Amino acid sequence: MLLEVIKSIIFDIGLGHYLILAAILFCIGIIGLISSRNIIKILISIEILLNAVNINFIAFANYGDLYFLQGQVFALFVMAIAAAEVALGLAIFISMYRNKQSVDVEDYTTLKG
């Protein structure tokens, strides 16, 4: 009896819980994106934003019609775009770091070749 009550409390997660989690992650990502001056922290903040979007896609797909897989497909596309974004961002960061020896964004105001 007690075990069933505990299971119903723990495993009774609705759509609202996922949306609250995604909103919290999105706010953390926005705050990190706005307040950070480090390039690595900015890239991590963008990844947190994209993960919040993925949580929304999967949550709506899970609580919608299970025969249509639009949420899962969009989440896979977002993950692929995020991986490409990180690879490209790190390549740009490494090439810029070789020139200035700094990870501060404000040091890169002029992007001359």
Image: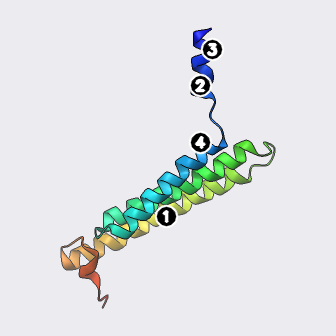
Q: Is residue 113 visible?
A: no
**Secondary structure at numbered mark 3:** helix
Return the residue at label 4: 17
Numbered badge on residue 84: 1
Name the residue: 32% across, 63% down.
40
Quarter of the image where the N terminus is located:
top right
Which is more foreground, mark 3 or mark 1? 3
Q: Amino acid at mark 4?
A: His
Determine the residue positioned at 23% across, 80% down.
Answer: 107
User: What's the amino acid at mark 1?
Assistant: Ala
Disc 4 to disc 2, C-alpha distance: 13 Å
Closer mark to the observer between disc 2 and disc 1? 2
Q: Vertical placement of 110 versus 43: above or below? A: below
Alpha-carbon span between mark 4 and mark 3: 21 Å
Q: Are marks 1 and 4 in contact (CB under 8 Å)?
A: no
N-term-proximal mark, 1 vs 4? 4
For label 2, the residue is 9
First reached walking from the N terminus: tag 2 or tag 1: 2
Q: Which one is earlier in the sequence, the residue at label 4 or at label 3?
A: 3
The residue pinned by badge 3 equals 4
